[in-house]
Structure formats: structure tokens, C-alpha cells
Image (cartoon, rainbow, N blue to C red):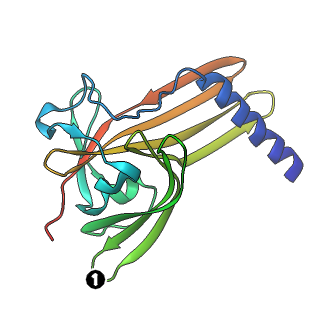
């Protein structure tokens, strides 16, 4: 049974890679596009090894969807962690810097409230002074003789001129159902205000 589940998962991963090749963009450096809310301020680079992102932010922020609608969003949820802390402190642990100056790191996340709860987000990189956290959420499915698919979430972080935390989320889903490929991707912008010291 485990061998079959492993084969299905591998098939779903290979399918997702095949379908998404050329469809998913790495947003580094993070630059505003036509959907970026201009009143959020100019984006600036996070600096070498993304040191400029370290600090404390409001956990409650705002997401701006494709239609221009805004909705509340949690920084902890964006990073794939549970909790409803008022503020979230971010720091990084650089593991290695390559010859291009890009860093492989672990994002350290402290949910601050009555007590601090610490999390670590693996799979983060500082690429062209943009923090990229990949594979935040992954799901795969398969049904014999019907189809298979998978979904993944990534987030690309920078800061605004007023030191707010800004991210472009990348949520995509790829399926093959009865031999027909289906691909969906949403890329909302989100913003979290800097918390007072």
C-alpha cells in the first residue's frame, strides 16, 4: 500500500512539474505590477540576506485580490502556522550564501501574545534581496483511472518604504482529470503593518 501511495505522490509531483513548467514565475526581485495597490507605498529591496525584513509586524493584514477587493489575512496563516497572535516577530538564520549573494535560510517566526510561540519555516531563500518561502502548503491527490493533481503555495516578501511587510502570494493547483489538464493560479498581494516597538 505504501508503495502505491508513493507512486501516486511521485506521479502527482511529476505532473505538477510538467504542467507548471513555464507557468509559475519566481518573483525576485519583487516588483509591483498592475494589481499592486499604489497606496501601499513603494517597494524597496530587503537588503543582503534579507536582513531588512527582520522585525515585528501586525499579524492582521490585508490581501488585495485580482478584482481589487480587500480581505483580512493573518501573517501566521500566510506562513502556514496556526495562531491568532496580535504581533509576529520575524528573524532569519542564514545557513549558506552562494556565489551570487543569494542566501539559503530558515525563517524564525515568533507569535507574540500572552506567551511567545516559536516556529521555523524551512524552504526559504533570499534571492535578489527578496525573501522567497516555497512549498508552504502542498497537497496531492489521485484516484485510479480518474485523475491526479496537486497544489502548492509560495510567498515572496519585501518591504515598503514605510517599513511595512509586503508579499505576493502564489497559490497554484494543477490536475489531470480523465486526461484533461487543468491549471489554476492566484497571486494576491498582502500587506502587514510594522508593529510599534
Going by the image, does 117 lie left or right of 35?
right
Quadrant assignment, res 8 = top right
Q: Which one is in front, 94 or 144?
A: 94
Q: Which one is in front, 37 or 148?
A: 37
Residue position marked by numbered label 1 in the rendering: 114
Q: Which one is in front, 145 or 139?
A: 139
Q: How many marks?
A: 1
Q: Which residue occupies the extreme top position in the image? A: 180
67 relative to 89, above or below: above
Q: At 37% across and 60% down in the image, what residue appears?
A: 76
Residue 82 visible, this orientation: no
Q: At 29% across and 27% down in the image, what residue appears?
A: 66
x, y percent for residue 28 = 41, 34
Q: At 40% across and 76% down in the image, what residue appears?
A: 117
x, y percent for residue 43 = 22, 38
181 relative to 66, above or below: above
For label 1, the crowd category at 10 Å Cα-Cα, with few meaning under 14, some 14 to 19 and many 20 or more, is: few
Going by the image, does 4 lie left or right of 59?
right
Q: Which residue occupies the extreme front position in the image? A: 99
Residue 157 visible, this orientation: yes
Is the C terminus in the top left, top right, bottom left or bottom right quadrant? bottom left
77 relative to 157, above or below: below
Going by the image, does 57 lie left or right of 20?
left
x, y percent for residue 127 = 45, 41
Q: Secondary structure at mark 1?
A: loop
Amino acid at each position: 500500500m505504501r508503495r502505491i501511495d508513493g507512486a501516486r505522490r511521485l506521479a502527482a509531483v511529476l505532473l505538477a512539474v510538467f504542467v507548471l513548467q513555464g507557468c509559475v514565475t519566481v518573483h525576485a526581485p519583487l516588483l509591483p505590477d498592475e494589481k499592486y495597490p499604489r497606496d501601499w507605498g513603494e517597494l524597496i529591496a530587503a537588503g543582503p540576506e534579507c536582513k531588512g525584513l527582520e522585525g515585528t509586524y501586525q499579524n492582521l493584514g490585508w490581501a488585495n485580490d485580482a478584482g481589487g477587493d480587500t480581505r483580512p489575512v493573518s501573517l501566521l496563516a500566510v506562513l502556514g502556522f496556526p495562531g491568532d497572535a496580535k504581533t509576529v516577530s520575524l528573524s532569519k538564520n542564514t545557513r549558506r550564501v552562494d556565489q551570487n549573494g543569494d542566501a539559503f535560510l530558515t525563517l524564525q517566526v515568533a507569535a507574540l501574545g500572552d506567551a511567545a510561540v516559536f516556529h521555523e519555516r524551512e524552504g526559504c531563500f533570499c534571492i535578489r534581496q527578496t525573501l522567497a518561502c516555497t512549498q508552504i502548503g502542498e497537497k496531492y491527490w489521485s484516484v485510479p483511472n480518474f485523475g491526479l493533481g496537486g497544489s502548492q503555495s509560495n510567498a515572496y516578501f519585501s518591504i515598503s518604504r514605510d517599513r511595512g511587510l509586503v508579499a505576493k502570494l502564489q497559490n497554484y493547483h494543477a490536475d489531470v482529470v480523465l486526461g484533461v489538464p487543468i491549471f489554476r493560479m492566484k497571486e494576491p498581494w498582502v500587506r502587514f503593518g510594522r508593529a510599534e516597538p
